[in-house]
Amino acid sequence: MIKKMFFAILAIGIFTTSCSNDDDGPTTAGLTLNLTGLEELGSDYVYEGWIIVNGAPVSTGTFTSVTFPQIFNVDATQLANATKFVLSIEPAVDPNPEPAPTKILAGDFSGSSAAVDSNGIVADFSGASGKYILATPTDTDDTNEASGVWFLDNTNAPPPVAGLTLPLLPDGWKYEGWAVIGGTPISTGTFTKVAATDDAAPYSGSVALPAPNGADGFFPGEDFLQGAPAGTTFPTDLKGATIVISVEPSPDNSAAPFTLKPLAHVVPGNAANHTVIDMGAGPVVSLSGTVSR
C-alpha cells in the first residue's frame, strides 16, 4: 500500500512538472518611463520606446499620453541585456518595424536605470544664439517694415550674414521660425540651413530676394503682408510679438510649434526697423528623463 502511494505521488509530480515546462514562455519585466517636457503629438503619430540589445533595436511599445510615469512589460532577458534606451516619433500606422529617423531622447543604461536626454540624439542647443531684423524686403512699400522678420545680421552689411548660430540637425528634424502675434503662432517657414531660403513664403510679397555672398539663397524669415490667418490682420506690427525658433519633427502633422524651442525673444516696443536685435534662450532647450528597469 505504501509503495502504491509513493508511485502515485511521484507520477503526480512528474505530470505537474511536465505541464509547467510545456507552459513556460518568455518572462517579462517592467520598464518605467519618467520623462519631462514631452507634448502630445498629432493624431497621426505616436511615441515609441526602444531598447538596444546586442546592437539591435527592440520595441518596448508605443504611447500617446505624456503623463508619467508609465510602465511597459518587456522581455526580461532582453531588458536585462539592454545597453541603451531610445525614444522615437513614429507614424501611428507604421509598416516599418525599424525606428524612424526622428529620435528625440536617448541614454545608456547604468545598472538599473538610464538617464535620457535630447542633447545627444537631437542636438545640443546650449551654444545656440540668434539675431533678427524687422523688415519687409518682398514688397516696395517702406511704410510697413515692422511687419516682417528675417534671421540675418546686417551690422556690417553689405552683404548681410546669417543671424542664427544653430547646430546641424540629424535626419528627421527641421528648424522652424515663428512670430507669436496676439497669442497666435504664425510660421515663418521651416529650414535646415541658416544661410539659405526657408521652405515656404505664404505671406510674403512678390519681390524676389537676393542671394548675398556666402548664402545659399536668402535667409530664413517672412514678410506678413497677405493671406493672414483667421483672427489676424496683415500688414501688422511685430513690436511686442514673440519671435521663436523651434525644432520640429519631419514629417510634422501639427500646425503648432513643437516642444523644443531653443531661441525666443519678445520684440521690444521701441525696436528700430532694419536694425539687428539679439534673441535669447528659448523656454525649452532640452528634454530629459529617467528610464528604470
Image (tube, rainbow, N blue to C red):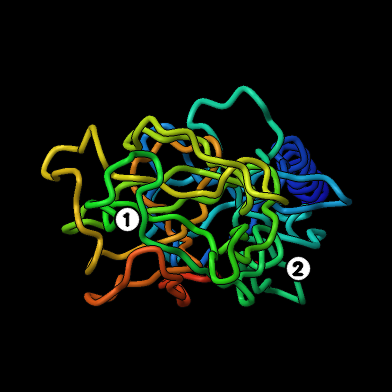
Which disc number belongs to residue 179? 1
* Residue found 68% across the figure and 30% down from its top: 97
Is residue 34 or residue 37 the one in the foreground? 37
* Residue found 65% across the figure and 52% down from its top: 28
Which disc number belongs to residue 131? none
Q: CA distance from mark 1 to mark 2?
A: 37 Å
Is residue 91 in view from this perspective? yes
- For mark 1, does the 10 Å Cα neighbourhood hold few (<14), some (14 to 19), or many (20 or more) residues? many
Residue 22 position within the rendered picture, expressed as x and y whole percent measured from the top left = 75, 35
Q: In the image, 2: left or right of 97?
A: right
Is residue 263 or residue 105 the one in the foreground? 263
Residue 100 position within the rendered picture, expressed as x and y whole percent measured from the top left = 65, 38
Given the current orientation, which residue lies at the most extreme top position?
95
Residue 220 position within the rendered picture, expressed as x and y whole percent measured from the top left = 51, 49
Element carrying mark 1 = strand
Element carrying mark 2 = strand
